[in-house]
Image: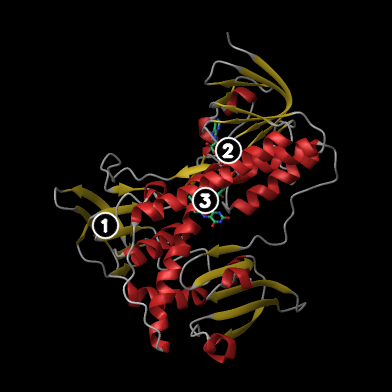
Amino acid sequence: MADIIETEVAVLGGGPGGYTAAFRAADLGKQVVIIERNPSIGGVCLHWGCIPSKHLLHAAEVIQEARAAESSGIRFGEPQIDIEKLRASKDRVVSTLAKGAEGLAKARKVRVITGEGKFLGSRTLQLSTGDQVRFEYCIIAAGSRSIELPMIPRDDPRVWDSTDALELKNIPKHLVILGGGIIGLEMAEVYHALGSKITVVEMTDQIIPAADADLVKPLMKEMKARYEGIYLGTKVTEVKPLKRALKVMLEGGKAPEYLEADALLVSVGRRANGDLLDLERAGLEHDRQGVITVDDFLRTDVKHIFAVGDVTGAPMLAHRAAYQGRVAAEVIAGLPSSYAPMTIPSVAYTHPEVAWMGLTEKEAKQQGIACTKGTVPWQASGRALSAGKQNGVTKVLFDKKTGRVIGAGIAGYQAGELL
Ligand code: FAD
């Protein structure tokens, strides 16, 4: 028999946006239900994103640091990598945190229902279990998914998205990475440290296109030394699955006609999941990227339905999703809360890291804001030099008229922490 579950707040999706919203709403006295299609809450960030990638990046950093120590006279020898053990330790971290999140839900009496939810009307969700959830308020936190490209076969096990890459099934001899954004470059770090040759193919003329060109220079310098190839301004036009390898056909830039890859990671961005929720039945819309529009209070066009996190578009970051979740819960509880961040920091956990916040120079120019810039190359920093980390730069942007800081960026060792 299908049940009808009544609740004050229904949260659709149990990622950082959803569980933060649910926990905050419960703490503020609301009765809350989370609907999550996966067996465990935590979302992309915990299961297939931030946490597993940062665990593997930590392993990669240990390997790189051990190698770098050689120039100071300390030699460790080549690392012995037990891929099974590395995978198991990553899975252990994920499951520990997932249990923690479940515990936090239980402690707050937040009910977690496993099932896929779609709108049946503006007050009702239909679940894949057959049950229905009727709500006073709904917070949509359904996240995003990897973009797939039509000319790339998805049924060949050698074609990966970021989730496949994080599974660490094997270490390909030659990994071609399509997309020079944060996710692709972080995976490049991991697989390079584990022994793969890496080639990066990026359509625009810069890696990490969202960041300023001067900020990605220190990373580009190290990537050029480490990787097989980096092809900017280059498109993949076709992928031919041959028996011995994937033949990746290229067009543009200084790229060869094709590359032969043992695996191809497609990391060309993510699209919001708004198109999978039957929004029109609730009187809502999404744009072509699946994005749901919200106001400063995270309200959609239907005033008792809110949306938070990746499903509301860029920047698709876990800390943004969590903060939005908190604000949505507070607005529902009647608190004077709104989403108006002065800055949302972004970090690429590459080697060296690239981190920025506030406006970039590109954005200041687009917005017609005249700015001045203060830049410190790390060659001038005794602390950086003594650690052998002089490949870095710190810059701060100031509004020319007022002198006010409008943005900052750091590239270098542990730039994310510094920022
Ligand atoms: P999600 O985490 O995507 O959660 C949405 C949840 O909703 C999922 O659990 C999904 O199963 C569920 N769901 C969707 N539709 C339905 C439905 N119809 N019914 C029921 N459940 C549904 N961000 C950072 O800030 N720092 C990082 O270092 C970082 N690293 C990343 C590395 C990788 C490889 C990836 C892919 C992403 C990374 N991100 C990082 C981005 C971060 O993971 C996302 O911004 C964050 O997870 C968004 O949270 P969310 O709650 O909006 O959505």
Determine whether, in the image, residue 415 is placed left or right of residue 399: left
**Mark 2 CB lies closer than 8 A to ligand 1:** yes
Vertical arrangement, residue 48 with respect to residue 397, above or below = above
Q: Is residue 210 visible?
A: yes
Residue beneath disc 3: 93
Residue sitting at x 85%, y 42%: 335
Residue sitting at x 72%, y 61%: 342
Indicate the secondary structure of the residue bearing disc 2.
loop
Q: How far is the residue under mark 1 from the one under mark 3? A: 24 Å
Residue beneath disc 1: 172
Residue 306 drawn at (x, y percent): 69, 36
Q: How far is the residue under mark 1 from the one under mark 2? A: 31 Å
Q: Quadrant of ligand 1?
A: top right
Vertical arrangement, residue 314 with respect to residue 25, above or below = below
Residue 400 drawn at (x, y percent): 71, 79
Q: How far is the residue under mark 3 from the one under mark 2? A: 14 Å
Mark 3 vs 2: CB contact within 8 A = no
Instruction: Answer few, some or many: residues within 10 Å of disc 1's Cα (few below 14, many 20 plus, some between 14 and 19).
Output: many
Q: Amino acid at mark 2?
A: Ile
Indicate the secondary structure of the residue bearing disc 1.
loop
Residue beneath disc 2: 41
Query: Considering only order in the chain, which callout, 2 or 1, is on the residue closer to the N terminus?
Result: 2
